Amino acid sequence: MKCALVTGGSRGIGKAICLKLASENAYHILINYQSNKEAALQTLAEIEALGATAEILKFDVADHEAVNKVLHTWKENNPQAVVEVIVNNAGITRDGLFMWMQPEDWKSVIDITLNGFYNVTNFFIQEMLRSKYGRIINMVSVSGVKGTPGQTNYSAAKGALVAATKALAQEVAKRKITVNAVAPGFIRTDMTADLDEKELIKMIPANRFGEAEEVANLVAFLASDKAGYITGETININGGIYS
Ligand SMILES: NC(=O)c1ccc[n+]([C@@H]2O[C@H](COP(=O)([O-])OP(=O)(O)OC[C@H]3O[C@@H](n4cnc5c(N)ncnc54)[C@H](OP(=O)(O)O)[C@@H]3O)[C@@H](O)[C@H]2O)c1
């Protein structure tokens, strides 16, 4: 059984990626979520309605022990399964001006984005190297490329993930494992629901927010066989915001 694991796969961009990798890339999907089980089950149902298969896996990507425990148990129960694709998509924002930023808002964003990438990817990397095939896709952001005021924590976490993408790509390229980052601008999800869309689209050349499915299309391509010679890249998908 060939599998794709999508962290934060229950809602938003992650959900759209789960549906796309199930329908177009024919993977059995491991839908990771942290707390919203209802949303995870809804994503599972939508994948099954497409005639594909999936299962839900609850863990906090920032919790190294929890990640190892859940994934070890899953491996024991599925000895034949191979995880070919990892999409490190789970992420949060805790926005605010840096001068007022509390340690918890700094730490939680870094823990989930950057340590989450380490915890999940490191669990699978040896097996991926042995099987000589893999696709690792890290969800970053326009903020991690150009920096965004009010998001020093988020920009730092995503920028670090861009650098980790470049470094790991060079380590594993010989074994046919690609590592890329996808950097969306403003995408319509729960994360951006409270933003002033009318005001913000003034700085987006395409004059609109993007849709989660548009990001999923790019991820599905990077996760496919066709993208085997693209690695270490950060691909912007932001309606033309210069970054
Ligand atoms: N939306 C945008 O405009 C935008 C732009 C650039 C980059 N991004 C990035 O794209 C990714 C997805 O964003 P989104 O807009 O789809 O966000 P979202 O709608 O808020 O969904 C976040 C997802 O991440 C999961 N999650 C959060 N913390 C987690 C943790 N500690 N462990 C495991 N899962 C966790 C959530 O699970 P639960 O359902 O259990 O809460 C949910 O499935 C993030 O990395 C974000 O930074 C988004």
Image (cartoon, rainbow, N blue to C red):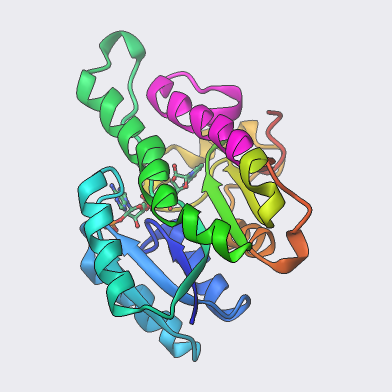
Magenta segment boundaries in residue numbering:
143-168
Residue 50 location (% of width, % of height): 50, 87
Left or right? Give the position of 231 relative to 130. right
Q: How many labels does the image show?
A: 0
Residue 101 x %, y %: 27, 16
Q: In which quarter of the image is residue 166?
A: top right
Q: Nearer the viewer, residue 148 or 163?
A: 163
Left or right, 231 with reference to 141: right
Nearer the observer, 202 or 228: 228
Identify whether 95 is placed above or below 129: above
Side of 107 where 154 appears, left or right: right
The image quarter containing residue 21 is bottom right
Q: Residue at x 58, y 40 (%)?
A: 168
Residue drawn at x 63%, y 47% is 172
Can see residue 211? no
**Which quarter of the rendered picture does the C terminus lie within?**
top right
Q: Does the magenta stretch include residue 150?
A: yes
Q: Which percent across, then down, holds residue 155?
A: 47, 26
For the question of whether residue 18 can be seen, the reply is yes
Q: In this view, does 95 lie to the left or right of 205?
A: left
- Position of residue 205 relative to residue 49, above or below, is above
Q: Which residue is drawn at 27% across and 55% down?
A: 68
Who is closer to the viewer here, 89 or 190?
89
Q: Does the magenta stretch include residue 38?
A: no
Q: Where is residue 100 in the image (x, y as percent from the top left)?
A: 26, 12
Query: Residue extending furthest top?
Result: 99
Tell me if residue 154 comes above or below residue 66 in the rendering: above
Main secondary-structure element of the magenta-colored stretch = helix
